[in-house]
Image (cartoon, grey):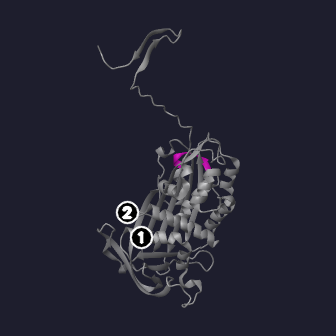
Amino acid sequence: MDPTFVDVVNRFGLQLQALTLNPSESTGLCAMNIYHCLSMVAAGSKDANLAAFSQALGFDASKLNQALQNTVQLDAYSKTNTSVDFSSGSSIWHREDFILEKPWLETMQNTFGATVGPMELQPINDFIFRETKGKFKDLIKSGDLAGAVLILVACLYFKAKWQNPFEKRMTMAESDFHTWDGKTTPCAMMHKVDKMEYVENKEYQACFLPYQSGGNSGPQWKAAVILPKREGFDAMRDTLTGFSNRPEALVTLFRGVSSGQTASSRPVSEARTQKISLSLPRFSLKLHLDLIPSLKKLGLGPAFQPSGDFAPISTGPLMISRVTHDLFLEVNEEGTEMAAVTVVVMTKSRSRQVIKEMTVDRPFLFLVFDDASGLVLCGAVVNSMNVS
């Protein structure tokens, strides 16, 4: 897999993560899933919209086809570890009177492997339910179809067991978790003492937990747990921003001792295997994000205004009216389960009617007339509001 493209997707995800960070609640996203869905739309853009997708997603606009190939290759590569249950699926749903351009439609089917169907509520929800192994039921509501002419959906599912599971008997059912606002909430704290890859520097502690692997080929999935040493919201935002500015440093950190470097040549921040006493909460999250505000900040603003720059998809002024991301994530003693859904809704916008204002707050002419003949029955110049 092209390491440069991996850095591109990582940077995109970390930037979004920093922009969606919320001091009062958990946030999360699957960058690969979002990138995949937006790439499908990018494939149908041109001119200003293509330039906006290029900026937001981090690819060269003159090499769109290569960017699309990299996206689907990353998806294929991610499925090659047979010890992990990994699946993904894409679909396109359109109003029956909305004509799709054949070249774009063929790209969706042949390159992205997307299924195509009429915009009907139950089939869309059935697709999402099936592709996420039942983690999202009835995600799309009937009101979501109002005004829509095209809906793009990308789903992803991941389930993996720890290489070295936590023992359930070591889990403390009643432990404390301290939030940014100074509150303490109860949690079930898993615990184990084991050899694992670990980093500690002046900014954070980090450990890496491997999942079961079917061999040396394909992805070697691990979990990273990164704990900033400074407490508070700003410390987490700074951590995400730092990694998004240098995604290659994050990959170096991930690779740890497997990179083949000697201890003397290894960067200070790179992981070393040592015995660690780890306490990690058992948790489950189900999150919903509106990505439009964050994507606008990344440069995708033109795509949310009606224009002809989606002409490769269909004729007439088109715009994106919704980009949402739903994430399910569960971490327990056995391993990790994750499901993600990205939905893009497009509407066919008519030219907005210009409303002229007329405020009659100065002298005016008032006429009573016959519309058929043009006869003026009465005329008055109103110069004051005085009533006799």
**What percent of the width, then of the height, locates residue 24?**
35, 62
Of labels 2 and 1, the one closer to you? 1
Residue that appears at 46% across and 74% down: 335
Q: Which residue is mark 1?
A: 236
Q: Residue furthest right?
A: 103
Q: Quadrant of the N terminus?
A: bottom right
Q: Quadrant of the C terminus?
A: top left
Task: Inspect the magenta stretch and tell me whether residue 119 lies in it.
Answer: yes
**Is 58 in front, or is 144?**
58
Task: Inspect the magenta stretch and tell me whether residue 287 lies in it.
Answer: no
Position of residue 259 relative to residue 146, above or below, is below
Circle 1 crowding by C-alpha within 10 Å: few under 14, some 14–19, many from 20: many
SS for callout 1 = helix
Give the mark nearer the N terminus: 2 vs 1. Answer: 2
SS for callout 2 = loop
**What percent of the width, then of the height, locates residue 329?**
45, 66
Magenta span covers which residues?
Answer: 116-123
Residue that appears at 39% across and 24% down: 362
The residue type indicated by label 2 comes to Glu
**Is 246 in front, or is 93?**
246
Q: Which residue is mark 2?
A: 25
Circle 2 crowding by C-alpha within 10 Å: few under 14, some 14–19, many from 20: few
**What percent of the width, then of the height, locates residue 134?**
49, 59
Residue that appears at 56% across and 50% down: 302
Task: Determine the image quadrant of residue 112.
Answer: bottom right
The residue type indicated by label 1 comes to Met
